[in-house]
Amino acid sequence: MASPATALKVEQVAVHFGGLVALSDMNFSVGEGEIVSLIGPNGAGKTTAFNVVTGFLESTHGSVSYRGTVLNGLRPHQIADLGLIRTFQRTSVFPNDTVYDNLLVGLHRQGRVSLFEAILGLPRARSSQRRLRERASELVEWVGLERRAHDLAGLLSYGEQRLVGVALALAAEPSMLLLDEPVSGMNASETHTFVQLIRNIRDRGVTVLLVEHDMPMVMSVSDRIVVLNYGRIIAEGPPDVIRNDPAVIEAYLGQGATRA
Amino acid sequence: MKLGAAILTIIALASVPLWLRDPYLMNALITTGIFIIGAMSLNLLLGFTGQLSLGHIAFFGIGAYVSALTSLGFDIGLPGGFRIVHDPWPPIAGFLLAIIVAGLCGYLVGLLSFRVRGAYFVIVTISFAEVVRLVALNWIELTQGPLALTNIPSITIGLPELGSLTLRTKLQNYYLVLAVAVAAYVLISRLVHSHFGRAMRGLMENETLAVSVGIDVTKTLTLAAVISAGIAGAAGSLYAHYIRIIDPEVFAFINTVTMVIMVITGGKGSLFGPVIGGMIFGLLPVFLRPIMAPEAQWIAYGGVLIVILFVLPRGIVPSLAQRFAKRWNRSPAAGPVTFSERDAKEPA
Ligand SMILES: Nc1ncnc2c1ncn2[C@@H]1O[C@H](COP(=O)(O)OP(=O)(O)O)[C@@H](O)[C@H]1O
Ligand SMILES: [Mg+2]
């Protein structure tokens, strides 16, 4: 199998918070259309890596590029404009808007018409509005929240809010999606549906970088896995290799387990 | 607001002069209308982006001065022996320039303050208003300082084929203000329902999430500030050509406070809120003046403000809308009636 063209490239990235080294010399890449998982114990630096890639955090050292564009120094909305869209580990919705309206906000990148067209209500603005509404309905359906479409997002259950978060990211029409612990807080059946959703997303040609603690899910869905511990990559490879890697087992089970 | 309700409201407002002949009350209605336009513009920032412009009257005052000076003409000396001589232009040109110049000032203030927001924006806007007031007070050659600009001409509107009409009477000015207010309302409504408005709302509710889907904070907030300032400038221009005299007192902080009160009592983030809040606090003086000293009036405003916010904490329009929605929308099948009835009576 020929390896796909590189979509995301992270080179020698380091992040220091004062004296704390959250990431050091991080190197990895994600190919177009791949599903890659970034795993590691709590505090390993996974969310920090997401923050660097999506422009929410400036790295202390190193560079990140997406499809040949260097991302260092770009603001988050500019990176989003390149099609690199993330979700958040903590639930993140527009709480005082309905699910449907959340998605309309998420469709921002698709809805751009000029100010004058919008204010004068010109045909292009109207047809754009109509398309956005259709798309919002589609997305609501796609993540299975039709029955909640007109409820305030802030009143939804935790699992449902996580789905809204993913739908919002999808609304932004990503070419690469970064999911930060998307199934935490979901029950087994929600998780199962979600795995289908991720596969669907990939089948549409979207590259996926996933951070997740649910190991069975990670093993079943990933093409490749990158393992992080204390800010360093300790292993990288396909699920079968990672599953049996002694360094990974050690990192996950901890010293207590090795002594036992 | 639904189209039918909007048309009924406009017809009702347009018919007021048919039965109200009292010139004192007409005057109060016209100045109230002008302040409502200012309050609507403030609401665009405060209610739809969450940014509090505590110097909002600056844009109003700039509009008033620009419009007055454009239509009066001026002759000023600059350092280095230059002179700028401007011959009077028609007031309608002043009206348009007022919008443009106020809008540009909104752009500058936005640029200065939107990288760091919140309290910073409040401080920049307050300072801006104070600086502009000092300029108006001290650049006597241009503004006459405390002596005021007087004899500002009334607005003349030219109708092709029909000749031109100078709006001198209260009746004419009432309709002028109503027309501009409706235009401003429609503009703001279109804006907040467009994807620009959704970007504003998104930023106000969850900025991190909003930028993650590609919303540009600085651009969105600056756009809101420009349009808000432009509308405030239009209101200022109407004020100058109606009152026909302006002095630096127009920039007084209390005028901004009045607009903020109008927005908050009416309901920030509600399109119609500033209209209701504006009517209450614009017309309250009419009823209080005969019975109270000016100082006591301010205390009465405070009392009214507190009572309204105590009973309807989100402001009149949103709180009432919420209650009516609970009453009418929840059919018995959708939930226990007792529950919704109890909810509707709770002041929370
Ligand atoms: N903004 C911050 N300031 C200081 N320390 C931080 C900050 N963000 C994360 N950290 C620290 O960096 C380390 C990595 O955190 P994080 O990337 O959130 O880990 P993970 O997502 O893998 O659980 C942790 O020790 C965390 O406490
Ligand atoms: Mg994390």
Image: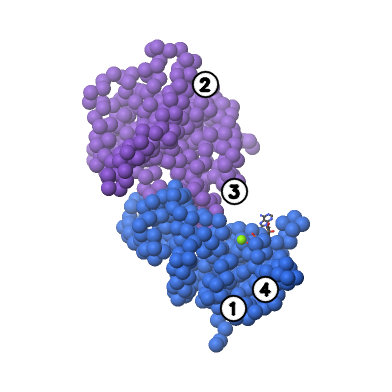
Looking at the picture, which amino acid does disc 1 mark?
Answer: Pro
Q: Chain of mark 4?
A: A
Q: CA distance from mark 2 to mark 3?
A: 39 Å
Chain A rendering hue = blue
Question: How far across and how far down the image is residue B236, in percent?
Answer: 44, 33
- For disc 2, the marked residue is B147
Question: In front: mark 1 or mark 4?
Answer: 4
Q: Quadrant of residue B343?
A: top left
Question: How far across and how far down the image is residue B242, in percent?
Answer: 38, 27
Q: CA distance from mark 2 to mark 4?
A: 84 Å
- For disc 1, the marked residue is A239
Question: How far across and how far down the image is residue A66, in percent?
Answer: 58, 70
**Residue furthest out toward the front:** A260
Q: Is residue A123 visible?
A: yes
The residue under the point 52% across, 41% down is B51
Question: Which quadrant of the rendered structure holds the N terminus of chain A?
Answer: bottom right
Q: CA distance from mark 4 to mark 3?
A: 46 Å
Q: Is residue A43 above or below residue A26?
A: above
- Taking depth in this image into account, of B181 and A59 the one nearest to the observer is A59
The label shown at residue B115 is: 3
Looking at the picture, which amino acid does disc 3 mark?
Answer: Arg
Query: Is the Cβ of the residue at disc 2 closer than 8 Å to that at disc 3?
Result: no
- Taking depth in this image into account, of B170 and B111 the one nearest to the observer is B111
